[in-house]
Image (tube, helix red, strand yellow):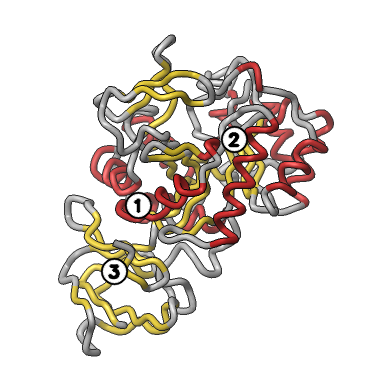
Amino acid sequence: MIIQSKRIWVVNTWLAAQVEVEEGKIVNIYPYGEKEVDEDYGDKRIIPGFIDVHTHGAYGFDTNDANEEGLRNWMKNIVKEGVTGILPTTITQSEEVLTNAVKNVAKVVEEGYEGAEILGIHFEGPYLDQVYKGAQPEQYCVKPDLEQFKRYLAASNNLIKIVTMACEHDDNYELTKFLRANGIVCSQGHSGATFEQARLAIANGANSMTHVFNGMTKFHHREPGLVGAAMRYRDVYGEIICDGNHSTYEALNDFFTAKGANHCIMITDSLMVKGLPVGTKVLFGGNEIELYPDGSAHLTDTKGLAGSTLHVNDGLRILVEKAMVPWQTAINACTLNPARMLNVDDRKGSIQTGKDADLVVLNDDYSVEMTYVKGQKAF
């Protein structure tokens, strides 16, 4: 199969080109018009498939539900917004609930499914700070426990690829160092860490930060906090929710400008109310949340932000059109950077020969015309 467009994102620029796919892989990139094509997308933009590394659910399903069909339905439908790689994300709960959640993901991966590729599991909690817990249930937030985590990892069939934790509560950084040694991303988040504590966590193996600006100590010019560390240490990855609700457009611009093109990661932090009607109320981690008209989800008791219903293609639009972030920086944030962080950039994250043919065709309004997962039309 050969597809072409006058605007394909290749080597950090828009190129008039053709992409040839065989057996799910990109095998050739030709000049525009050189070969007979199967699909001509005119001047529609074609970019690498999106990778969302922090997303709890959608369409009425939450990762903690441990429901096979709910997970399969999510993977099948999420391609409609251009997502081709994903990390289903847990929320703090009891050991029984979390064990069943990761077992469910492992079972679906083993047995097969359609749609976006499950690249692993993001284990958010239970090792979180109780002050900065956000919508996470306080009664289940506990100190990092290496032996307990090993049980979770075994239950997941080694699918856990990111752990969000408050490293300042990790005695001697035992779990932090274990994660680093085993190729698992340790991401500081829901944390009350000072700048100095954040720096020590990085020195001991933490290499990312979870939804920067949210669920962490704030920036002050005499106490930079975790936000200050996120901006200061540019080679540490930083997730950020790009919906315009969790952070203003100006804050998004500040973060991406400080961080540069290679370590920002766009996330949706989407909840199970994504794809459901405005006003829907559901339980999230045992707490009731409500979907607001602006797409944000809030706790019904405190009205605090609980998460988003962001679509990644809309996040890209917000970054480029509202936050005024350069194309390379914005596209990297939802393609190449998460692939690099997960060590799958040998096959994901860019349009290059030898890589998986995960491609998204975008209209000028950023709506998705077509998504290809390993060369196959996904919807």
Nearest the viewer among 297 and 287 is: 287
Q: In this figure, which residue is indicated by the disc labeled 1? A: 77
Residue 126 position, x and y percent, is: 66, 29
Disc 3 and disc 1 in contact, CB within 8 angstroms: no
Q: Residue at x 74, y 33 (%)?
A: 200
Q: Residue at x 47, y 60 (%)?
A: 113
Q: In this figure, which residue is indicated by the disc labeled 2? A: 124
Q: In this figure, which residue is indicated by the disc labeled 3? A: 8
**Position above or below: 262 against 66:** below
Using residue 206 as the reference point, say whether residue 23 is left or right of it: left
Q: Earlier in the sequence, mark 2 or mark 3?
A: 3
Q: Amino acid at mark 3?
A: Ile
**Position above or below: 81 against 352:** above
Residue at mark 3 to residue at mark 1: CA–CA distance: 24 Å
Nearest the viewer among 337 and 224 is: 337
The reply to whether residue 240 is in sight is: no
Residue 59 position, x and y percent, is: 36, 40
**Position above or below: 377 against 23:** above
Q: Which of the 4 quarters of the picture holds residue 291?
A: top left
Nearest the viewer among 327 and 337 is: 337
Residue at mark 1 to residue at mark 2: CA–CA distance: 23 Å
The reply to whether residue 373 is in sight is: yes
> Mark 3, residues whose alpha carbon is within 10 Å: few (<14), some, or many (≥20)?
many
Mark 3 lies on a secondary structure that is strand
Disc 1 and disc 2 in contact, CB within 8 angstroms: no
User: Which of the two discs, 3 and 1, sits closer to the camera?
Assistant: 1
Q: Which of the 4 quarters of the picture holds residue 371?
A: bottom left
Q: Amino acid at mark 1?
A: Asn
